[in-house]
Image (spheres, rainbow, N blue to C red):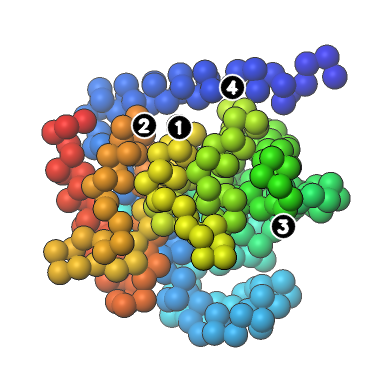
Amino acid sequence: MSISRRNFVRALGLSSVALHSGSDLLAQVESNQPLFTISLAQWSLHRTIFGSSQDDRQSFNELLRTDPDRILQGTLAPLDFAMTARQEFDIDAIEYVNVFFFGHARDAAYLRELQQRSNDAGVKNLLIMCDSEGRLGDPSSTERTKAIENHHKWVEAAAFLGCHSIRVNAGSAGSWSEQAKLAADGLTTLADYADTHDIDVIVENHGGLSSNGQWLRSVMEIGNHPRLGTLPDFGNFNLGDGELYDNYQGVAEMMPYAKAVSAKSHNFDSDGSETDLDYERMMRIVLDAGYRGWVGIEYEGVQVEELTGIRATKSLLERVRDKLATEY
């Protein structure tokens, strides 16, 4: 190729992202928007949707591949997610998870219904979190290509639903540098495809080296694609084998590339603060990076039922936002 599409968009690089982010920030200031807007990740309701199907992981994984609708054994249908976000929590933006409609990525009737439900509820579709589709940094070029192609249908579904991104994982194997190069290759190839649908590809810290902020930052630098970014999750910094990465350092390292943010929560004290994370400190890191976009609630606790945990997380984010409003 003389100058490929990939090389062209790479040449635009971070300068394009910076210009886009700057214009977004200016628009928000001029329209007197809040520091950030709260959205809801569908995973916050995974127990309510799955019911007892996750109790047997082997059976769950088998059904996900063979008859995915059978894992939906809870009291909330995935099609009712938008309505639940609006009616239960007064939240007007949502983040889907692909495993809740795993067999429907190219089901036009299902996607139309999903879109209609969100329209009826006055809720904006932001992204689809994609799991169980293979390792985008697999050392085998055949398996890596298969994983990339497995994600194509979710890019298409995200575009149909009016989302801005799909969230993916950067799974790989090998040394630090080998995994970074392999992940960057798979991610940028997918980002090239996503670009044709006006969709971003964002990587969450989600275990292994992806939960090392420095490593994930290196993947972004190698990839250097304007469609490629991160989704910093406040809580996913388990490197494996009992090794943990510093949450605050990791989020700070990921924020320069962030196109979404996930506010993970588990437990709350009597004052409504998260017991394991300093939300004010986290949000200062997010805001200091210049981010003014959506912050998605992802409640994963078990001490209270999911609706209560979501409300507690929303209340905490609102309290932090109000406190910081005079400083930013």
Please give the name of the residue rendered at 23% of the width and 47% of the height, measured from the top-left corner.
280
Disc 1 from disc 4: Cα separation:
13 Å
Please give the name of the residue rendered at 26% of the width and 25% of the height, measured from the top-left corner.
29
Label 4 sits on a secondary structure element that is: helix
Q: Which residue is mark 2?
A: 289
The 10 Å Cα crowd at callout 2, few under 14, some 14 to 19, many 20 or more, is some
Which residue type does callout 1 highlight? Pro
Measured as percent of width and height from the top left, residue 192 is found at 70, 33
| Mark earlier in primary sequence (1, 4) | 4
Of tags 1 and 4, the one toward the viewer is 1
Q: Are marks 3 and 4 in contact (CB under 8 Å)?
A: no
Q: Viewed as shown, does residue 108 lie left or right of 4?
A: left
Q: Are marks 3 and 1 in contact (CB under 8 Å)?
A: no
Disc 3 from disc 2: Cα separation:
31 Å
Label 2 sits on a secondary structure element that is: loop
The 10 Å Cα crowd at callout 1, few under 14, some 14 to 19, many 20 or more, is some
Of tags 4 and 2, the one toward the viewer is 2
Q: Which residue is mark 4?
A: 13
Disc 2 from disc 1: Cα separation:
6 Å
Measured as percent of width and height from the top left, residue 66 is found at 73, 75
Q: Is residue 216 above or below residue 42?
A: above
Disc 4 from disc 2: Cα separation:
18 Å
